[in-house]
Amino acid sequence: MKITKTRLAPTPSGYLHIGNVLSFLITASLAKKHAAKILLRIDDLDQKRVRMEYIQDIFDTLDFLEIPYDEGPKSSKEFIQDYSQLNRLPIYKEYINELKEKKLVFTCNCSRKTLLKKHPKRFYTGTCLQRDLPWSKNQTALRLITNLTQTVNINHYTENQQVHQLPNAMDFFVIQKKDTYPSYQLASLVDDIYFDVDFIVRGTDLWDSTLAQVYLSNQLLRQQTFDQTVFYHHQLYKEEGKKLSKSNGSYSIRQMIKAGVKKEGIYRTIGHYLNLPQETTNLEEFSSQFLLLMNQSSKSGIVNSSPPFKAD
Ligand SMILES: [Zn+2]
């Protein structure tokens, strides 16, 4: 298994919460084990939700918890100047053009309301596939012509390679949004190729995205070696049985710090949550305890990355 670079990939659409930090700590620990480099990648294409204070919060949180990384912006200013995804729009465009040339995309003007009318979970049923709508800014998105019988091979960190299928939720997934920016699936894939990332650590909530991104890479000549990428999906941090999210009022790290919680307290909380053998108060302690737990048992939920996952 070749592992040389992984990434932290937060989205600045809210203040970071403890679930984000859980993901950072697991990523940093596994990177350490393999002497892999860590890239900080901040996904800012969702411009309507991005705010400068959320970008700054990412730097503040990494700094407060003393989580180091090897590559990527060191400040908000450097991020905007050199690392914003807006700087890579021409690169995303090249990939989208390749899909267009291969006639693998179609235009779609469905609204969220229309999608809901056709399917209770808004799965796309191919409404615009044969319509051949003219492309028009802010009116049409580009969707991928997917084939659910095509298999997707995933290199799981804790298992051998496994064969999967694209889930119905990802049928005809969006490549380019109506605002003309690339979709998360396309931008994330292109960025991981661009930065030579070969190890992706993320929560089980992104399992469908993993399948979509590997599926998409199989359609592209430019994908190079993305099919060698190794994936580790960790369980999500849950409080009282509910998934943490920026929108449901879960405590942000920022709020915890304001309330007087120290760095050690945050490490302790996450360590307890994972049932680490000993109390941990910093990244070094966390990593050694986490890696120890991983070696000891693959039965513990947190180190079991093999799908299918229980619904979150
Ligand atoms: Zn449509």
Image (cartoon, grey):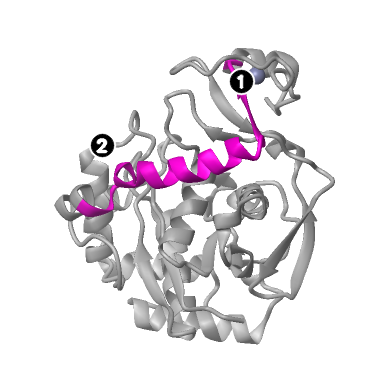
Q: Which residues are magenta?
A: 82-111
CA neighbours of label 1 inside 10 A, class few (<14), some (14 to 19), many (20+): many
Q: Is residue 2 left or right of residue 195?
A: right
Considering every residue shown, the one lying at the far left of the view is 77
14 above or below 35?
above
Residue 14's place in the image compared with 288, above or below, is: above
Q: Which residue has dot 2 on it?
A: 51
What residue sits 30% from the left and 68% below the top? 71
Dividing the picture into quadrants, the one containing residue 38 is bottom left
Quick one: which residue is furthest to the front in this view?
A: 101
Q: Nearer the viewer, residue 21 or 218?
A: 218
User: Is residue 282 covered in magenta?
Assistant: no
Q: Mark 1: which amino acid?
A: Cys
Q: Is residue 168 left or right of residue 72?
A: right
Q: Quick check: which quadrant has ligand 1?
A: top right
Q: Which residue is mark 1?
A: 108
| Main SS, magenta residues | helix
Q: Nearer the viewer, residue 259 or 158?
A: 158
Q: Is residue 65 visible?
A: yes
The picture places residue 80, in percent across and down from the top left corner, at: 21, 47
**Residue 257 or residue 87, whichever sits in front:** 87
